[in-house]
Image: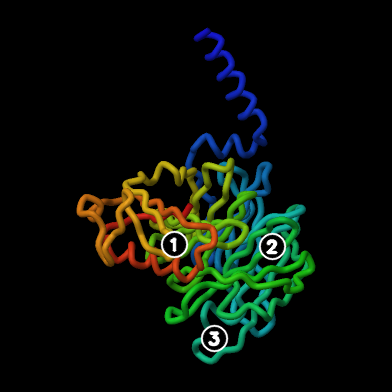
Amino acid sequence: MKNLFILFFAVVFISLNAAAPAGVQQLLRGRAIQCEGNWSGHLQGFAFDGRDKLYWVFNQHLVQTDLKGKLLNATMLKREPGFKNHGGDPCFANGLIYVPYCGSGFNAELNGNPSYNFVQVYDEKDLSLVKSYSIPEVIYGAGAIAFADGNFFVAGGRPANMPGNTVYEYSPEFKLLKTHQLEFNSHLGIQSMAFDGKNFWFGCYSVRHGSAFRTGRDFKVNGYYNFSGAYGMIPLDGRKILLASPADGKKSGGKAAVADPGKMRKTVARLELDDEGRIFYNGKECPHAKLPGKLKNFRRKHIVISVPRKLPAEKVVSAVSAVSQWISADFDIVLQ
């Protein structure tokens, strides 16, 4: 019986791995990837074609490499007439690379500048510019784009004194369909975003709860993380992600490695909210601005908060804010 169980497990394991595309399997092996070459500005993000190529965007360059980081092709991002040149975190869809382009500078509107934001589309074969779409609805800078359920989603800059972040949903022809408000504050806005088939991932330079967060399709936050996702994240298998960062000692370079967000934290407490937004721990209500002493000083771990489905968003945000004030060390909060 034991041998049969082992055989069954082995067959399932092999079948699951065989189901993953070869390119994903190669990335999941965990070998660090160094993007070959030095490029203008710093790394803004990257995208995966699902097969055998990565597309890295720096301030002024789009770079194509294989999955080991070997340079295959590169091009200067097309400069929109009269504007600055600032590419953002791209996405790959239908043989094309979509690059958000911030024409007036990230958060430049704060200095009285008008909004000039675009999505530039490049062909995967030769990196030639296919089309450029103006997206005037986006303000404070187009910094990241993701493709999900047939539509495109764009996010970007945000003034420090303005709460939340905005995600703009577009049709394939980049006609604005709707906007989504994220009840989440971040430093300088959203720098990267990706979709894993179920959740959206967002990377920021700095936020109250970490540097990355995750939402469902409804854009309700369901996870906070301490790792930095500002330079690009590529979901691989529903569990692991390929995480990008500037190359060591080279602001003009890029690198990436596989990360497992689930292993970066450990649950130290499970809290519950009632229908009025009150916080409970082990069946007892937590006094305002106070959490049991044993949970106050921990690092790189997380708290799970169970949230009633019908609880208003403002009460959820209030509870998360209260919990964050109780704890001085690094932590994650996961909403369930």
Q: In the rendering, at what x and y percent does residue 170 appear?
A: 72, 68
Under circle 1, the secondary element is strand
Kindly identify the residue that appears in the image at 58 percent across and 53 percent down: 199
Task: Say whether disc 3 or disc 2 marks the residue closer to the N-terminus.
Answer: 2
Under circle 2, the secondary element is strand
Q: Residues within 10 Å of mark 2 (few under 14, many from 20)?
A: many
Reading the image, the residue beneath label 3 is 109
Reading the image, the residue beneath label 1 is 251
Q: Quadrant of residue 117?
A: bottom right
Q: Residues within 10 Å of mark 1 (few under 14, many from 20)?
A: some
Kindly identify the residue that appears in the image at 32 percent across and 46 percent down: 268
Under mark 2, the amino acid is Tyr
Reading the image, the residue beneath label 2 is 98
Q: Quadrant of residue 102?
A: bottom right
Q: In the rendering, at what x and y percent does residue 18 appear?
A: 65, 28
Q: Is residue 245 among the parts visible in the rendering?
A: no
Tell me the distance, in whole angstroms, between the alpha carbons under discs 3 and 1: 26 Å
Under mark 3, the amino acid is Glu
Under mark 1, the amino acid is Lys
Kindly identify the residue that appears in the image at 57 percent across and 76 percent down: 141
Q: In the rendering, at what x and y percent does residue 19 appear?
A: 67, 31
Answer left or right for 16 relative to 44. Answer: right
Compared to residue 261, the image places residue 115 above or below, namely: below
Instruction: Give the color scheme: rainbow, by chain, secondary structure or one colour.
Output: rainbow
Task: Say whether disc 1 or disc 2 marks the residue closer to the N-terminus.
Answer: 2
Under circle 3, the secondary element is helix
